[in-house]
Image (cartoon, rainbow, N blue to C red):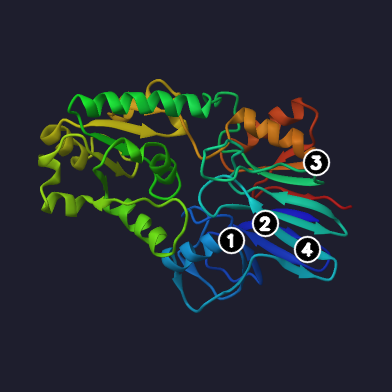
Amino acid sequence: MRAYLSKAIQIKGKNWKIACDSTNSTYYPLVFYSHAHSDHIPRRLPKTNIITSKTTQTLLRNLTSNYSEPIYYEEYSQEDLKITQKSSGHIIGSTALKIDSSEGKLIYTGDVSIRDKGFLEPFKPEKCDILIIESTFGSPDYIFPEYSHIINETRDQILNYLENGFPVVLMGYALGKAQMLYHAFSKLSETIIMHEANYKINSLLLENEIHGSISAISYNDAKERALLEKANNWILYTPLKSGRDTFFTYLKKKYNVKIFAFSGWCIFPNYKFRMAIDHGVTISDHADFQELIQICKMCDPKQIYTIYGDNIRFAAELRKLGFNATPLSKQTLLESFF
């Protein structure tokens, strides 16, 4: 099998080829989309054979422009090739790709997490010959606190604010992090409000009966009904932006809100001040450095290709542990035959 980067991550066998997480609209005979984040999908979806989960399929239909309806598969087989999916634990609908062929077994993780977040099935590593693994937090600088501990600690902080008359704003990406926050904190108030970006995704999930949605009202609706003035114990979910943004400076001045931002980057002490927020909470829908190492050890591959983020640093750290690891970039062409 060959793995290389040419506009998209491409994996090629003797009689087959697949492109993974292509962000361009180039036609490939077979494409895998691990999840529906904008940095993993194209704006315009060409008609082709697509392997993805049912949830991601629904999101693709609504978040991309289709020239015509693609042909979707959850599994794909031809001759001695079998392609299947398994949960990657990243966001709703996210999957890793598993390729079994006469040339060996390959796993492409996409973005990945093995943490138990309570509503997503974590990625479960398994033995393989080749592992292509994301490296967003592939540096020893990124070791996150235990998930349930940080969630419980943050829940207590939010409750304290609400009970003392301070509404709270919880920032996280509308697709992915937001669903984690809904699951963790939506029961803390009877008044749950969403920024329009969050409300749009949440409504899509509700309409399609996709796990991860909650009951809420939009910010515009809450304003029209004067709910923000009637109560001071509301929670507003918004995308992650600077607290200096006009919208948030207005909320601070008008309602004295307390702002929480949720990101793996919060591990840096200056993040809170740089973002002009009250609390930076270190949680991520990606694996941290220790989890990435654990995945590699449990998969125990003959060869590892690192992609995205700190892929050069992570490959170097893996080589220290005795793995055959190489960062995948446009300058590398990696081959492995079994």
Q: CA distance from mark 4 to mark 1?
A: 16 Å
Relative image position of residue 108 (x, y in whole percent): 68, 50
Q: Is residue 142 left or right of residue 209?
A: right
Q: Is residue 221 left or right of residue 203?
A: left
The residue indicated by pointer 2 is 85
Residue shown at the point (14%, 34%) measured from the top left: 255
Q: Is residue 51 left or right of residue 207?
A: right
The residue indicated by pointer 3 is 301
The nearer-to-camera label among 3 and 4 is 4
Q: Residues within 10 Å of mark 3 (few under 14, many from 20)?
A: many
Q: CA distance from mark 1 to mark 3?
A: 25 Å
> Regarding mark 3 in the picture, which secondary structure is present there?
loop
Relative image position of residue 333 (x, y in whole percent): 74, 51
The image quarter in which residue 153 lies? top left
Q: CA distance from mark 2 to mark 3?
A: 18 Å
Q: CA distance from mark 2 to mark 1?
A: 8 Å
Give the mark nearer the N terminus: 2 vs 1. 1
Give the mark nearer the N terminus: 3 vs 4. 4
Residue shown at the point (52%, 38%) measured from the top left: 117
Relative image position of residue 133 (x, y in whole percent): 66, 43
Residue shown at the point (24%, 26%) measured from the top left: 161
> Regarding mark 4 in the picture, which secondary structure is present there?
strand
- Marks 2 and 1 close (CB-CB < 8 Å): yes
- Marks 2 and 3 close (CB-CB < 8 Å): no
The relative height of residue 73 versus residue 95 in the rendered view (above or below) is below
The label shown at residue 115 is none
Give the mark nearer the N terminus: 2 vs 3. 2
The relative height of residue 239 versus residue 158 in the rendered view (above or below) is below
